[in-house]
């Protein structure tokens, strides 16, 4: 295994419809010697997610593990980081597909002392607003960041920051990204990661975008983690 190896960490709950497709994709797009393992951290799925991962792992050329966890993406991702073997952590959503040679691209940035970052992101939608939002992710501006772009970070830097803040049931990605921007330690790799627009399709583009803007505004005005989650649970996850 190379000096710089990647642990891919995928937090899931009820992702039976996407997880096999993603694992197949990762197996095809990555160089096995660059990947320590793929850890699927399950927050209590009630569908076939865990069974599908177990079955897929039997024939995979990259070690794949499914790890039960308490519910909550921050808790799930921290557990994945704690059990990882790689020197680089790569946090990936189950409905996203990183670019060809994503592993080589990440390792190349780390070798240049860019210890954390993401890819630019493209929604799988032709809606003009989502296309514009996708275009904006190539910029370095903090306002253009989000968890759907995926997140790589060296394990040493992740531990130094203290991982994801488990007080936050939502917005945990942004809390970590804020810490990285404070350290001026963030790079946007100029290759596309594709991500599903399924929540926008389900809730409506403008309605959901408004709800996300309200969450950002509430956080900026000083709302705590419970207030943010309460708003999210009432208006988005319901």
Image: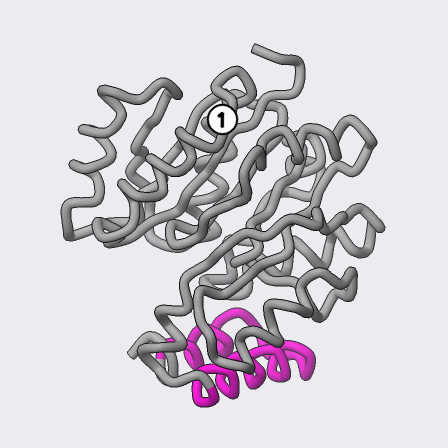
Q: Front-most of 196 and 43?
A: 196
Q: Which residue is mark 1?
A: 84
Q: Nearer the viewer, residue 17 or 221?
A: 17
| Snapshot quadrant of residue 196 | bottom left
Considering every residue shown, the one lying at the far front of the view is 126
Front-most of 15 and 23? Answer: 23
Q: Residue furthest top?
A: 1
- Residue ID at (72%, 59%): 178
Q: Position of residue 134 (x, y in %)?
A: 60, 68
* 226 part of magenta stretch: yes
Where is 44 relative to 112, above or below? Answer: below
Is residue 7 covered in magenta? no
For the residue carrying disc 1, how many other residues have a C-alpha within 10 Å: few (<14), some (14-19), or many (20+)?
many
Q: Main secondary structure of the magenta part?
A: helix
Place of residue 237 in the rendered image (x, y in percent of width and height, measured from the top left): 33, 75
- Vertically, is 234 above or below 57? below
Q: Which residues are magenta?
A: 206-233
Name the residue at 71% across, 70% down: 143
> What residue is rendered at 19% in x and 37% in y?
52
Left or right, residue 172 beside residue 143? left
Name the quadrant of the N terminus.
top right
Location of residue 116 by image quarter: top right
């Amino acid at each position: 295994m190379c000096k710089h190896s990647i642990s891919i960490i995928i937090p899931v709950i009820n992702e039976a419809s996407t997880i096999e497709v993603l694992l197949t994709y990762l197996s095809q797009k990555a160089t096995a010697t660059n990947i320590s393992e793929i850890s699927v951290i399950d927050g209590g799925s009630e569908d076939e997610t865990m069974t599908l991962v177990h079955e897929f792992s039997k024939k995979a050329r990259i070690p794949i593990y499914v790890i039960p966890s308490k519910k909550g993406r921050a808790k799930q991702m921290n557990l994945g980081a704690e059990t990882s073997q790689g020197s680089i952590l790569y946090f990936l959503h189950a409905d996203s597909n990183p670019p060809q040679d994503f592993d080589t691209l990440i390792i190349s940035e780390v070798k240049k002392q860019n210890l954390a970052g993401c890819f630019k992101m493209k929604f799988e939608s032709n809606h003009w607003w989502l296309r514009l939002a996708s275009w904006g992710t190539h910029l370095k501006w903090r306002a253009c960041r989000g968890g759907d772009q995926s997140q790589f970070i060296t394990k040493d830097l992740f531990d130094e920051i203290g991982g994801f803040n488990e007080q936050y049931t939502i917005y945990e990605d942004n809390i970590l990204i804020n810490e990285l921007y404070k350290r001026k330690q963030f790079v946007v790799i100029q290759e596309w990661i594709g991500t599903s627009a399924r929540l926008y399709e389900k809730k409506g583009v403008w309605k959901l975008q408004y709800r996300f803007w309200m969450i950002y505004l509430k956080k900026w005005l000083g709302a705590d983690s419970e207030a943010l989650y309460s708003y999210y649970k009432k208006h988005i996850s319901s």
